[in-house]
Protein backbone atom coordinates (compact mmCIF):
# COMPACT_ATOMS: atom_id res chain seq x y z
CA UNK A 1 0.00 0.00 0.00
CA UNK A 2 1.37 3.41 -1.00
CA UNK A 3 1.07 6.17 1.57
CA UNK A 4 0.91 9.84 0.59
CA UNK A 5 4.00 11.85 1.49
CA UNK A 6 3.92 13.26 5.00
CA UNK A 7 2.92 16.90 5.27
CA UNK A 8 5.90 18.84 6.70
CA UNK A 9 5.32 19.65 10.35
CA UNK A 10 8.47 21.74 10.91
CA UNK A 11 10.07 24.34 8.73
CA UNK A 12 13.28 22.41 8.00
CA UNK A 13 11.20 19.44 6.88
CA UNK A 14 10.51 21.45 3.70
CA UNK A 15 14.22 21.32 2.98
CA UNK A 16 14.57 17.67 4.00
CA UNK A 17 11.89 16.66 1.51
CA UNK A 18 13.73 18.37 -1.34
CA UNK A 19 17.11 17.00 -0.24
CA UNK A 20 15.64 13.50 -0.52
CA UNK A 21 13.98 14.26 -3.87
CA UNK A 22 16.74 16.18 -5.70
CA UNK A 23 19.98 15.56 -3.74
CA UNK A 24 22.27 16.54 -6.63
CA UNK A 25 20.54 19.81 -7.51
CA UNK A 26 22.33 23.02 -6.48
CA UNK A 27 20.71 24.36 -3.31
CA UNK A 28 22.96 27.26 -2.33
CA UNK A 29 25.50 29.42 -4.09
CA UNK A 30 27.54 32.42 -3.02
CA UNK A 31 30.68 34.20 -4.20
CA UNK A 32 32.85 31.36 -2.86
CA UNK A 33 31.11 28.33 -4.34
CA UNK A 34 27.98 26.19 -4.32
CA UNK A 35 26.40 23.33 -2.37
CA UNK A 36 23.99 20.68 -3.58
CA UNK A 37 20.96 19.75 -1.51
CA UNK A 38 22.79 16.65 -0.29
CA UNK A 39 25.92 18.63 0.65
CA UNK A 40 23.83 21.26 2.41
CA UNK A 41 22.01 18.53 4.35
CA UNK A 42 25.29 16.95 5.46
CA UNK A 43 26.77 20.27 6.60
CA UNK A 44 23.60 21.25 8.43
CA UNK A 45 23.46 17.82 10.08
CA UNK A 46 27.06 18.05 11.32
CA UNK A 47 26.51 21.54 12.71
CA UNK A 48 23.21 20.48 14.31
CA UNK A 49 25.07 17.68 16.11
CA UNK A 50 27.62 20.18 17.46
CA UNK A 51 24.87 22.51 18.61
CA UNK A 52 22.94 19.70 20.26
CA UNK A 53 26.06 18.55 22.12
CA UNK A 54 26.49 22.06 23.54
CA UNK A 55 22.81 22.85 24.00
CA UNK A 56 20.83 19.63 24.37
CA UNK A 57 17.69 21.05 25.94
CA UNK A 58 14.99 22.16 23.51
CA UNK A 59 13.51 25.60 22.90
CA UNK A 60 16.76 27.55 23.22
CA UNK A 61 17.67 30.57 21.12
CA UNK A 62 20.85 30.62 19.05
CA UNK A 63 22.32 33.80 17.59
CA UNK A 64 23.59 33.80 14.00
CA UNK A 65 26.44 36.32 13.76
CA UNK A 66 27.48 35.58 10.18
CA UNK A 67 28.34 37.35 6.95
CA UNK A 68 25.90 36.76 4.13
CA UNK A 69 26.83 33.48 2.49
CA UNK A 70 25.89 29.83 2.23
CA UNK A 71 26.94 29.31 5.86
CA UNK A 72 24.08 31.58 6.95
CA UNK A 73 21.48 29.23 5.49
CA UNK A 74 23.31 26.10 6.67
CA UNK A 75 23.29 27.55 10.19
CA UNK A 76 19.55 28.31 10.02
CA UNK A 77 18.88 24.69 9.09
CA UNK A 78 21.22 23.40 11.79
CA UNK A 79 19.63 25.46 14.55
CA UNK A 80 16.16 24.23 13.59
CA UNK A 81 17.35 20.63 13.27
CA UNK A 82 18.82 20.84 16.78
CA UNK A 83 15.42 21.89 18.14
CA UNK A 84 16.08 25.57 18.75
CA UNK A 85 15.12 28.96 17.28
CA UNK A 86 17.57 31.18 15.40
CA UNK A 87 18.08 34.89 16.07
CA UNK A 88 19.86 36.79 13.27
CA UNK A 89 22.60 39.15 14.49
CA UNK A 90 23.76 41.12 11.46
CA UNK A 91 27.50 41.90 11.92
CA UNK A 92 26.86 45.25 10.21
CA UNK A 93 24.64 46.35 13.11
CA UNK A 94 26.13 48.64 15.78
CA UNK A 95 27.72 46.74 18.66
CA UNK A 96 25.32 48.33 21.15
CA UNK A 97 22.29 47.03 19.23
CA UNK A 98 23.76 43.52 18.96
CA UNK A 99 24.46 43.50 22.69
CA UNK A 100 20.89 44.53 23.44
CA UNK A 101 19.44 41.86 21.15
CA UNK A 102 21.63 39.12 22.62
CA UNK A 103 20.63 40.06 26.16
CA UNK A 104 16.97 40.57 25.35
CA UNK A 105 16.77 37.20 23.59
CA UNK A 106 18.69 35.47 26.39
CA UNK A 107 20.83 33.69 23.81
CA UNK A 108 22.28 30.37 24.87
CA UNK A 109 24.83 30.18 22.08
CA UNK A 110 26.15 32.11 19.08
CA UNK A 111 27.25 30.75 15.70
CA UNK A 112 29.79 33.08 14.13
CA UNK A 113 32.49 33.28 11.48
CA UNK A 114 34.67 35.80 13.32
CA UNK A 115 35.66 37.09 16.74
CA UNK A 116 32.58 38.21 18.61
CA UNK A 117 32.24 41.90 19.48
CA UNK A 118 32.70 42.82 23.12
CA UNK A 119 28.99 42.80 23.89
CA UNK A 120 28.66 39.15 22.82
CA UNK A 121 32.05 37.89 23.98
CA UNK A 122 30.75 36.20 27.14
CA UNK A 123 28.48 33.81 25.23
CA UNK A 124 29.40 30.27 24.16
CA UNK A 125 30.30 30.32 20.47
CA UNK A 126 30.64 27.87 17.59
CA UNK A 127 33.10 29.27 15.04
CA UNK A 128 32.51 28.34 11.41
CA UNK A 129 35.77 29.94 10.27
CA UNK A 130 37.71 27.28 12.18
CA UNK A 131 38.12 23.57 11.31
CA UNK A 132 35.46 21.18 12.59
CA UNK A 133 36.45 19.23 15.70
CA UNK A 134 38.29 16.01 14.97
CA UNK A 135 35.80 13.99 16.99
CA UNK A 136 32.44 15.20 15.81
CA UNK A 137 29.53 14.28 18.08
CA UNK A 138 26.92 11.81 17.00
CA UNK A 139 24.15 13.17 14.78
CA UNK A 140 21.59 15.23 16.62
CA UNK A 141 18.50 13.22 17.51
CA UNK A 142 15.28 14.01 15.69
CA UNK A 143 13.53 16.97 17.23
CA UNK A 144 9.92 17.17 18.29
CA UNK A 145 7.12 18.00 15.92
CA UNK A 146 5.47 20.99 17.55
CA UNK A 147 4.67 23.40 14.70
CA UNK A 148 3.72 26.04 17.27
CA UNK A 149 7.31 26.24 18.54
CA UNK A 150 9.25 29.38 17.52
CA UNK A 151 11.45 28.93 14.45
CA UNK A 152 13.10 32.33 14.66
CA UNK A 153 13.07 35.70 16.42
CA UNK A 154 13.56 38.80 14.27
CA UNK A 155 13.95 42.22 15.86
CA UNK A 156 12.06 45.21 14.54
CA UNK A 157 12.55 48.84 15.50
CA UNK A 158 10.40 50.10 18.34
CA UNK A 159 8.71 53.49 18.35
CA UNK A 160 10.41 54.14 21.69
CA UNK A 161 13.81 53.22 20.26
CA UNK A 162 13.90 49.82 21.97
CA UNK A 163 13.90 46.97 19.41
CA UNK A 164 11.20 44.30 19.73
CA UNK A 165 11.84 40.59 19.17
CA UNK A 166 9.04 39.02 17.13
CA UNK A 167 8.59 35.28 17.75
CA UNK A 168 7.39 33.40 14.67
CA UNK A 169 6.53 29.68 14.82
CA UNK A 170 7.26 26.97 12.25
CA UNK A 171 3.61 26.68 11.22
CA UNK A 172 3.44 30.32 10.10
CA UNK A 173 6.23 29.98 7.55
CA UNK A 174 4.84 26.68 6.32
CA UNK A 175 1.51 28.44 5.79
CA UNK A 176 3.26 31.31 3.98
CA UNK A 177 4.90 28.94 1.50
CA UNK A 178 1.64 27.08 0.87
CA UNK A 179 -0.32 30.31 0.40
CA UNK A 180 2.19 31.73 -2.09
CA UNK A 181 2.15 28.49 -4.08
CA UNK A 182 -1.42 29.33 -5.03
CA UNK A 183 -0.37 32.82 -6.20
CA UNK A 184 2.92 32.26 -8.03
CA UNK A 185 4.08 29.57 -10.47
CA UNK A 186 7.26 28.62 -8.58
CA UNK A 187 9.34 25.52 -9.22
CA UNK A 188 12.64 23.69 -8.99
CA UNK A 189 14.08 25.40 -12.07
CA UNK A 190 13.89 28.82 -10.45
CA UNK A 191 16.90 30.73 -9.19
CA UNK A 192 16.22 33.00 -6.23
CA UNK A 193 18.37 35.55 -4.45
CA UNK A 194 18.80 35.94 -0.73
CA UNK A 195 19.27 39.64 -1.32
CA UNK A 196 18.48 40.84 2.19
CA UNK A 197 20.06 40.51 5.58
CA UNK A 198 18.79 37.61 7.67
CA UNK A 199 17.78 40.31 10.18
CA UNK A 200 15.18 41.61 7.69
CA UNK A 201 12.07 39.46 7.48
CA UNK A 202 11.96 39.51 3.66
CA UNK A 203 14.84 37.02 3.87
CA UNK A 204 12.52 34.45 5.50
CA UNK A 205 10.45 34.30 2.32
CA UNK A 206 13.57 34.30 0.14
CA UNK A 207 15.21 31.36 1.93
CA UNK A 208 12.25 29.10 2.56
CA UNK A 209 10.42 30.00 -0.64
CA UNK A 210 13.44 28.78 -2.62
CA UNK A 211 14.32 25.70 -0.55
CA UNK A 212 10.72 24.49 -0.34
CA UNK A 213 10.66 24.07 -4.13
CA UNK A 214 14.07 22.51 -4.68
CA UNK A 215 15.23 25.73 -6.36
CA UNK A 216 18.64 27.37 -6.20
CA UNK A 217 19.23 30.19 -3.72
CA UNK A 218 22.01 32.65 -4.53
CA UNK A 219 23.16 34.39 -1.35
CA UNK A 220 24.16 37.93 -2.32
CA UNK A 221 27.05 39.44 -0.36
CA UNK A 222 26.29 42.73 1.36
CA UNK A 223 28.75 44.67 -0.80
CA UNK A 224 27.08 43.49 -4.01
CA UNK A 225 23.59 44.16 -2.63
CA UNK A 226 24.60 47.76 -1.98
CA UNK A 227 25.90 48.27 -5.52
CA UNK A 228 23.20 48.62 -8.21
CA UNK A 229 25.72 47.84 -10.96
CA UNK A 230 26.95 44.68 -9.21
CA UNK A 231 23.39 43.60 -8.48
CA UNK A 232 22.42 43.93 -12.14
CA UNK A 233 25.48 41.94 -13.17
CA UNK A 234 24.62 39.24 -10.62
CA UNK A 235 21.00 38.99 -11.81
CA UNK A 236 22.26 38.38 -15.34
CA UNK A 237 25.21 36.12 -14.47
CA UNK A 238 23.22 33.87 -12.15
CA UNK A 239 20.14 33.88 -14.40
CA UNK A 240 17.97 34.84 -11.44
CA UNK A 241 14.26 34.24 -12.02
CA UNK A 242 12.72 35.30 -8.66
CA UNK A 243 13.89 38.59 -7.18
CA UNK A 244 12.41 40.07 -3.99
CA UNK A 245 13.30 43.71 -3.48
CA UNK A 246 12.43 46.90 -1.63
CA UNK A 247 11.15 49.56 -4.08
CA UNK A 248 13.76 52.15 -3.11
CA UNK A 249 16.51 49.65 -3.98
CA UNK A 250 14.80 48.76 -7.26
CA UNK A 251 14.80 52.46 -8.12
CA UNK A 252 18.60 52.49 -7.93
CA UNK A 253 18.77 49.39 -10.15
CA UNK A 254 16.65 51.10 -12.79
CA UNK A 255 18.96 54.11 -12.79
CA UNK A 256 21.99 51.84 -13.24
CA UNK A 257 20.58 50.29 -16.42
CA UNK A 258 22.47 51.29 -19.55
CA UNK A 259 19.96 50.89 -22.39
CA UNK A 260 21.35 48.82 -25.23
CA UNK A 261 24.37 47.58 -23.26
CA UNK A 262 22.96 46.06 -20.05
CA UNK A 263 21.97 42.43 -20.82
CA UNK A 264 18.39 41.49 -19.99
CA UNK A 265 17.99 39.48 -16.77
CA UNK A 266 16.03 36.21 -16.90
CA UNK A 267 13.59 37.44 -14.26
CA UNK A 268 10.14 35.87 -14.16
CA UNK A 269 9.04 37.65 -10.98
CA UNK A 270 9.97 40.86 -9.21
CA UNK A 271 8.18 40.83 -5.86
CA UNK A 272 8.10 44.18 -4.09
CA UNK A 273 7.78 44.56 -0.34
CA UNK A 274 8.50 46.96 2.49
CA UNK A 275 7.48 50.22 0.80
CA UNK A 276 5.06 51.67 -1.72
CA UNK A 277 6.23 51.16 -5.28
CA UNK A 278 6.90 53.84 -7.87
CA UNK A 279 5.20 52.74 -11.09
CA UNK A 280 7.56 54.98 -13.11
CA UNK A 281 10.45 52.69 -12.12
CA UNK A 282 8.57 49.59 -13.29
CA UNK A 283 7.75 51.26 -16.59
CA UNK A 284 11.38 52.25 -17.10
CA UNK A 285 12.46 48.64 -16.49
CA UNK A 286 9.92 47.37 -19.02
CA UNK A 287 11.11 49.87 -21.60
CA UNK A 288 14.66 48.57 -21.16
CA UNK A 289 14.00 44.83 -20.94
CA UNK A 290 10.54 44.10 -22.31
CA UNK A 291 7.37 42.80 -20.72
CA UNK A 292 8.18 39.17 -19.80
CA UNK A 293 8.79 39.92 -16.10
CA UNK A 294 5.77 39.85 -13.79
CA UNK A 295 5.74 42.56 -11.10
CA UNK A 296 3.93 41.88 -7.84
CA UNK A 297 3.07 44.44 -5.18
CA UNK A 298 2.84 43.03 -1.65
CA UNK A 299 1.99 44.33 1.78
CA UNK A 300 3.58 42.61 4.73
CA UNK A 301 4.56 42.84 8.39
CA UNK A 302 7.12 40.95 10.46
CA UNK A 303 4.41 40.30 13.06
CA UNK A 304 2.24 38.63 10.38
CA UNK A 305 5.05 36.50 8.86
CA UNK A 306 6.47 38.57 6.04
CA UNK A 307 3.57 38.83 3.56
CA UNK A 308 -0.11 39.56 4.16
CA UNK A 309 -1.41 40.48 0.70
CA UNK A 310 -0.19 40.39 -2.86
CA UNK A 311 -1.31 41.97 -6.09
CA UNK A 312 0.17 41.45 -9.56
CA UNK A 313 0.45 44.62 -11.60
CA UNK A 314 -1.27 44.09 -14.94
CA UNK A 315 0.02 45.03 -18.38
CA UNK A 316 -3.02 47.25 -18.85
CA UNK A 317 -2.16 49.24 -15.72
CA UNK A 318 1.54 49.49 -16.50
CA UNK A 319 0.93 50.48 -20.11
CA UNK A 320 -1.75 53.01 -19.22
CA UNK A 321 -1.62 56.78 -19.21
CA UNK A 322 0.94 57.89 -16.56
CA UNK A 323 -1.10 61.02 -15.88
CA UNK A 324 -3.92 58.90 -14.40
CA UNK A 325 -1.76 57.19 -11.76
CA UNK A 326 -2.59 59.70 -9.03
CA UNK A 327 -6.29 59.26 -9.68
CA UNK A 328 -6.34 55.46 -9.93
CA UNK A 329 -3.92 54.80 -7.10
CA UNK A 330 -3.40 51.26 -8.33
CA UNK A 331 0.19 51.20 -7.07
CA UNK A 332 -1.15 51.66 -3.52
CA UNK A 333 -3.80 48.94 -3.90
CA UNK A 334 -3.07 46.37 -1.17
CA UNK A 335 -4.55 43.53 -3.19
CA UNK A 336 -6.02 40.35 -1.75
CA UNK A 337 -4.93 38.65 1.50
CA UNK A 338 -3.07 35.38 1.16
CA UNK A 339 -5.13 32.27 1.72
CA UNK A 340 -5.32 31.77 5.48
CA UNK A 341 -4.69 35.45 6.22
CA UNK A 342 -7.43 37.98 6.99
CA UNK A 343 -7.09 41.74 6.68
CA UNK A 344 -9.55 44.19 8.22
CA UNK A 345 -9.46 47.98 8.30
CA UNK A 346 -11.05 49.16 11.52
CA UNK A 347 -11.86 52.55 12.98
CA UNK A 348 -11.02 53.71 16.49
CA UNK A 349 -14.05 51.81 17.85
CA UNK A 350 -12.92 48.54 16.28
CA UNK A 351 -15.60 48.66 13.57
CA UNK A 352 -14.98 48.24 9.82
CA UNK A 353 -14.54 51.58 8.08
CA UNK A 354 -17.11 52.71 5.55
CA UNK A 355 -16.26 53.51 1.92
CA UNK A 356 -14.12 56.63 1.79
CA UNK A 357 -12.93 56.13 5.36
CA UNK A 358 -9.43 55.48 6.69
CA UNK A 359 -8.62 53.08 9.49
CA UNK A 360 -5.93 50.89 10.98
CA UNK A 361 -5.00 47.60 9.32
CA UNK A 362 -5.65 44.56 11.52
CA UNK A 363 -4.40 41.12 10.48
CA UNK A 364 -5.69 37.73 11.66
CA UNK A 365 -5.15 34.15 10.57
CA UNK A 366 -2.24 31.87 9.74
CA UNK A 367 0.53 34.46 9.81
CA UNK A 368 -0.02 36.16 13.16
CA UNK A 369 3.10 35.76 15.29
CA UNK A 370 3.28 34.47 18.85
CA UNK A 371 4.03 37.95 20.16
CA UNK A 372 6.98 40.00 21.35
CA UNK A 373 9.69 38.17 23.25
CA UNK A 374 9.66 39.17 26.92
CA UNK A 375 7.17 42.01 26.31
CA UNK A 376 3.78 40.78 27.64
CA UNK A 377 2.35 44.30 27.99
CA UNK A 378 3.27 45.27 24.43
CA UNK A 379 2.07 41.91 23.12
CA UNK A 380 -1.30 42.45 24.81
CA UNK A 381 -1.50 45.96 23.33
CA UNK A 382 -0.72 44.98 19.73
CA UNK A 383 -2.10 41.40 19.54
CA UNK A 384 -5.75 41.84 20.44
CA UNK A 385 -9.01 39.90 20.46
CA UNK A 386 -11.65 41.44 18.23
CA UNK A 387 -15.20 40.47 17.27
CA UNK A 388 -15.67 41.98 13.84
CA UNK A 389 -18.99 42.14 11.95
CA UNK A 390 -20.72 40.03 14.61
CA UNK A 391 -18.34 37.13 14.00
CA UNK A 392 -16.58 35.07 16.66
CA UNK A 393 -13.62 36.69 18.45
CA UNK A 394 -10.31 36.34 16.63
CA UNK A 395 -6.76 37.27 17.51
CA UNK A 396 -5.66 40.24 15.40
CA UNK A 397 -2.38 42.07 15.07
CA UNK A 398 -2.83 45.84 15.14
CA UNK A 399 -0.32 46.92 12.53
CA UNK A 400 -0.20 50.68 13.06
CA UNK A 401 -0.54 50.97 9.28
CA UNK A 402 -3.44 52.87 7.75
CA UNK A 403 -5.56 52.03 4.73
CA UNK A 404 -8.32 53.87 2.92
CA UNK A 405 -11.39 52.00 1.70
CA UNK A 406 -12.37 53.20 -1.77
CA UNK A 407 -16.02 53.08 -2.88
CA UNK A 408 -15.34 50.01 -5.08
CA UNK A 409 -14.03 48.02 -2.13
CA UNK A 410 -10.34 48.52 -2.95
CA UNK A 411 -8.04 49.05 0.03
CA UNK A 412 -5.22 51.55 -0.56
CA UNK A 413 -2.24 51.97 1.74
CA UNK A 414 -2.41 55.36 3.48
CA UNK A 415 0.76 55.54 5.58
CA UNK A 416 1.57 54.92 9.22
CA UNK A 417 -0.61 55.89 12.15
CA UNK A 418 2.55 56.89 14.02
CA UNK A 419 3.60 59.12 11.11
CA UNK A 420 0.94 61.55 12.25
CA UNK A 421 2.19 64.95 13.23
CA UNK A 422 0.09 67.65 14.83
CA UNK A 423 0.85 71.13 13.54
CA UNK A 424 -1.25 74.17 14.46
CA UNK A 425 -4.01 71.84 15.61
CA UNK A 426 -4.08 69.79 12.39
CA UNK A 427 -3.36 66.05 12.43
CA UNK A 428 -1.33 65.27 9.31
CA UNK A 429 -0.32 61.96 7.72
CA UNK A 430 3.15 62.25 6.22
CA UNK A 431 2.33 59.57 3.66
CA UNK A 432 -0.45 61.72 2.26
CA UNK A 433 1.97 64.59 1.69
CA UNK A 434 4.53 62.29 0.05
CA UNK A 435 1.93 60.83 -2.30
CA UNK A 436 1.08 64.31 -3.58
CA UNK A 437 4.70 65.30 -4.27
CA UNK A 438 6.38 62.11 -5.47
CA UNK A 439 6.85 61.68 -9.20
CA UNK A 440 6.93 65.37 -10.08
CA UNK A 441 9.13 66.23 -13.10
CA UNK A 442 12.72 66.69 -11.99
CA UNK A 443 12.21 64.97 -8.62
CA UNK A 444 13.94 61.59 -8.45
CA UNK A 445 12.89 60.60 -4.94
CA UNK A 446 11.19 62.25 -1.98
CA UNK A 447 10.25 61.52 1.62
CA UNK A 448 8.68 63.73 4.27
CA UNK A 449 9.91 63.48 7.86
CA UNK A 450 8.93 65.07 11.11
CA UNK A 451 11.52 67.55 12.37
CA UNK A 452 11.64 70.40 14.88
CA UNK A 453 11.68 74.06 13.93
CA UNK A 454 14.15 76.62 15.27
CA UNK A 455 11.66 77.55 17.97
CA UNK A 456 11.13 73.94 19.03
CA UNK A 457 7.81 73.29 17.27
CA UNK A 458 7.07 70.16 15.21
CA UNK A 459 7.23 70.70 11.46
CA UNK A 460 7.41 68.76 8.21
CA UNK A 461 10.56 68.64 6.10
CA UNK A 462 10.50 67.26 2.56
CA UNK A 463 13.82 65.62 1.65
CA UNK A 464 14.30 65.08 -2.07
CA UNK A 465 16.82 64.21 -4.74
CA UNK A 466 16.96 65.74 -8.22
CA UNK A 467 16.65 63.65 -11.37
CA UNK A 468 19.63 63.45 -13.69
CA UNK A 469 19.98 66.13 -16.29
CA UNK A 470 17.65 68.67 -14.70
CA UNK A 471 18.38 72.06 -13.20
CA UNK A 472 17.95 71.48 -9.45
CA UNK A 473 16.90 75.09 -8.86
CA UNK A 474 14.15 74.78 -11.47
CA UNK A 475 13.08 71.44 -9.98
CA UNK A 476 12.99 73.01 -6.51
CA UNK A 477 10.79 75.83 -7.77
CA UNK A 478 8.40 73.34 -9.44
CA UNK A 479 8.28 71.28 -6.26
CA UNK A 480 7.35 74.25 -4.12
CA UNK A 481 4.76 75.39 -6.64
CA UNK A 482 3.23 71.93 -6.84
CA UNK A 483 3.05 71.67 -3.06
CA UNK A 484 1.15 74.95 -2.87
CA UNK A 485 -1.11 73.98 -5.77
CA UNK A 486 -1.90 70.42 -4.72
CA UNK A 487 -2.03 70.60 -0.94
CA UNK A 488 -3.94 72.64 1.61
CA UNK A 489 -1.70 75.15 3.28
CA UNK A 490 -1.44 73.14 6.50
CA UNK A 491 -0.10 70.14 4.51
CA UNK A 492 2.70 72.05 2.79
CA UNK A 493 6.12 71.14 4.30
CA UNK A 494 7.78 73.96 6.12
CA UNK A 495 11.15 73.15 4.60
CA UNK A 496 12.47 71.46 1.44
CA UNK A 497 15.95 69.94 1.57
CA UNK A 498 17.74 68.65 -1.53
CA UNK A 499 20.16 65.76 -0.96
CA UNK A 500 22.56 63.89 -3.25
CA UNK A 501 20.97 60.60 -2.11
CA UNK A 502 18.46 59.54 0.53
CA UNK A 503 20.12 57.37 3.19
CA UNK A 504 19.21 53.70 3.32
CA UNK A 505 19.06 51.51 6.42
CA UNK A 506 20.31 47.88 6.62
CA UNK A 507 17.05 46.58 5.14
CA UNK A 508 17.32 48.83 2.07
CA UNK A 509 14.48 51.08 3.12
CA UNK A 510 14.90 54.83 3.34
CA UNK A 511 16.27 55.62 6.80
CA UNK A 512 13.73 58.22 7.87
CA UNK A 513 14.94 58.29 11.45
CA UNK A 514 18.47 59.20 10.38
CA UNK A 515 17.12 61.99 8.18
CA UNK A 516 14.95 63.39 10.95
CA UNK A 517 17.80 63.33 13.47
CA UNK A 518 20.23 64.97 11.06
CA UNK A 519 17.86 67.75 10.08
CA UNK A 520 16.65 68.38 13.62
CA UNK A 521 20.17 68.52 15.01
CA UNK A 522 21.55 70.95 12.46
CA UNK A 523 18.75 72.79 10.67
CA UNK A 524 20.63 75.95 9.76
CA UNK A 525 24.30 75.02 9.25
CA UNK A 526 25.67 75.77 5.78
CA UNK A 527 27.47 72.41 5.79
CA UNK A 528 24.20 70.52 6.10
CA UNK A 529 22.36 69.35 2.92
CA UNK A 530 21.39 72.12 0.50
CA UNK A 531 18.08 73.69 1.42
CA UNK A 532 15.98 74.49 -1.62
Image (cartoon, grey):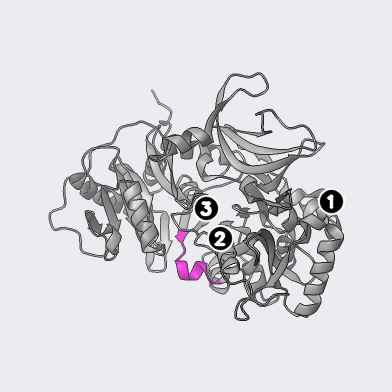
In magenta stretch: residue 99? no
Res 389 label: none
Disc 2 element: helix
Of 425 and 368, which appears nearest the observer? 425
Of 19 and 497, which appears nearest the observer? 497
Question: Could you give the CA–CA distance between mark 1 and mark 3, rounded to whole angstroms?
Answer: 40 Å
Do the residues bearing badges 3 and 2 touch, measured as CB atoms within 8 Å? no
According to the picture, the residue beneath numbered tag 2 turns out to be: 513
Image coords of residue 480 (percent x, y): 80, 68
Above or below residue 413? Residue 385 is above
Above or below residue 242? Residue 527 is below
Magenta segment: 218-227
Q: What residue is shown at x 16% (from left), y 48% (from top)?
A: 137
Q: In the image, is 210 to the left or to the right of 462? A: left
**Number of residues whose C-alpha sits closer than 10 Å to that of mark 2, classed few (under 14), some (14–19) or many (20 or more):** some
According to the picture, the residue beneath numbered tag 1 turns out to be: 327
Residue 73 picture quarter: bottom left
Question: Could you give the CA–CA distance between mark 1 and mark 2, rounded to whole angstroms?
Answer: 30 Å
Of 347 and 412, which appears nearest the observer? 347
Question: Could you give the CA–CA distance between mark 3 and mark 2, rounded to whole angstroms?
Answer: 40 Å
**Number of residues whose C-alpha sits closer than 10 Å to that of mark 1, classed few (under 14), some (14–19) or many (20 or more):** few
Res 189 label: 3
Q: Earlier in the sequence, mark 1 or mark 3?
A: 3
Image coords of residue 531 (percent x, y): 69, 75
Q: Which of marks 1 and 2 is nearer the N terminus?
A: 1
Amino acid sequence: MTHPPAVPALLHHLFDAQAARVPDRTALRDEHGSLTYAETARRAGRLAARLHALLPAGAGRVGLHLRRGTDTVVAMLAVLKSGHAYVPLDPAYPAERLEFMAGDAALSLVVSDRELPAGLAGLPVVRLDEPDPVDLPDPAPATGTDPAAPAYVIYTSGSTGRPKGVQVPHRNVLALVRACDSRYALGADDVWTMFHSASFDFSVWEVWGALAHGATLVVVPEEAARSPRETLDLLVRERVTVFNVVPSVFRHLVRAVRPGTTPAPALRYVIFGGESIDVADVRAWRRAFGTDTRFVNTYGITEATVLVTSRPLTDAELDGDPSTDAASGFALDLGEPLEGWELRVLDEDGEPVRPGGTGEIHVAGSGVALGYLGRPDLTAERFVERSVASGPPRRYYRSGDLARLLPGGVLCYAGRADDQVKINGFRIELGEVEAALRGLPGVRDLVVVKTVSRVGEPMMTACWTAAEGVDPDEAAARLRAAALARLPRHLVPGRFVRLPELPLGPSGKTDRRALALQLTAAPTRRTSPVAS
